Structures are given as C-alpha cells and as structure tokens.
Amino acid sequence: MGDAPTTITELSPACPIYASFFGFAGVAAAMVFSSIGAAYGTAKAGIGIAGAGTFRPDLIMKSLLPVVMAGIIAVYGLVMSVLITGDMSPHNNYSLFTGFLHMGSGLGVGLSGLAAGYTIGIVGDACVRAHAQQQKLYVTMVLILIFAEVLGLYGLIVGLILNTRAENKC
C-alpha cells in the first residue's frame, strides 16, 4: 500500500540487513589482532627481562619499557572498536559502504597492531638483554622501540581517517 519500508527486511539494497556484520567484523579484527600483537610483545619482551634480570636485577625497572609499549598496542584496538560501535545502532540504517569502511578500519588497526607487537617483542627481547650487558644502549633501545610502536600508530591513524568517512545514509 505505502512506498515506505515497513519492516527491516524491506530496506534498500544499499542498506541490507547483513551490513552490520562487516562493522562487527571490523570491531573483532581491531580487538583480536591488536591484542594478539600486544600479548606476543609482552611475552617475548618479558622473557628477555627475566633472562637479563638474573644477571642485572637492578635494571629490571628500566627494562619494563617494551612491556609497557606492547600494552599500548592493545589500547589502539580498543579505541578503534569503541569508535566503530559508537556508529552502530539498531535504530539507524547501516549501509554496506559503512560496514566495509568499518571492517577496513578495524583490519588496519588490528593488523598493524599485530605487526607492531611482534616487532616490539623481538626488539624488546634483544635490546633488554643487550642493555644488561652494556648500559649505554638504553637510548638506542628506546629509539628502536619508538619506531616499532609507531607502526601501530600508523594503523590507528588510517583507521581513524577511514572511520570519519563512514556515513549511515540509505
């Protein structure tokens, strides 16, 4: 009788009912991959701290830097997940384009977080052990860890840019 959609299944082709799946896939990708990267970085750097701490227990507190930096990677995924879910609502139309943008932003943050966490773990392990043998390497360790951390930050920036492009217009 009327031309307006009366049920959720009668939405336009630009806003299919399954479009939110892709947005939630972006949320999951951001959280899962960045958390895996943070966990690996924490574990790998923690092994280095435990190994170096047996020889130089006085340097353990300075050596916690890689573990802290690896934990920040998971925060990037959390931030992206919260932003994506803030755009989702059961009362708003959710376009397929927006779903794909959210999935891309979640994958960007998550996979770059995975790479950054892996890098922080490998570099953190080696640098903490080297710092235990030669204390002059601390500044070098910090610089290398900053460049490893920035990989995750690049993913967050790209994810934020993609997220600002999302529009729920149907």
Image (tube, rainbow, N blue to C red):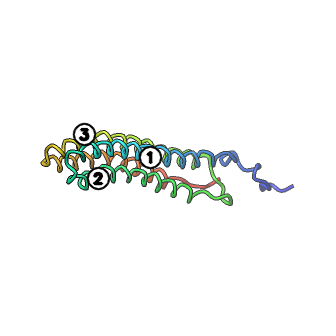
Residue 46 in the image, given as x and y percentages of width and height: 33, 46
On the image, numbered disc 1 is attached to which residue?
Answer: 34
Measured as percent of width and height from the top left, residue 27 is found at 54, 49
Query: In the picture, residue 7 is in which quadrant?
Result: bottom right
Marks 2 and 1, how far apart at CA: 20 Å
Query: In the picture shown, does residue 111 fall above or below 77?
Result: above
Residue that appears at 20% across and 45% down = 55
Question: How far is disc 2 from disc 3 in space, using C-alphas?
Answer: 13 Å
Q: Are marks 2 and 1 in contact (CB under 8 Å)?
A: no
* Disc on the earlier residue, 1 or 3: 1
Direction from residue 168 to residue 130 in the image, left or right: left
Amino acid of disc 1:
Ser
The crowd level at tag 2 (other Cα within 10 Å; few <14, some 14-19, many 20+) is some
Task: Indicate which disc residue 64 carries.
Answer: 2
Residue at the far front in the pictured view: 54
- Disc 1, SS: helix
- Specify few, some or many for label 1: CA neighbours under 10 Å numbering under 14, 14-19, or 20 or more: many
Q: Give SS at disc 3.
A: helix
Nearer to the camera, 21 or 19: 21
In this rendered view, identify the residue nearer to me: 91 or 26. 26
As shown in the figure, which amino acid type bears the numbered disc 2? Leu
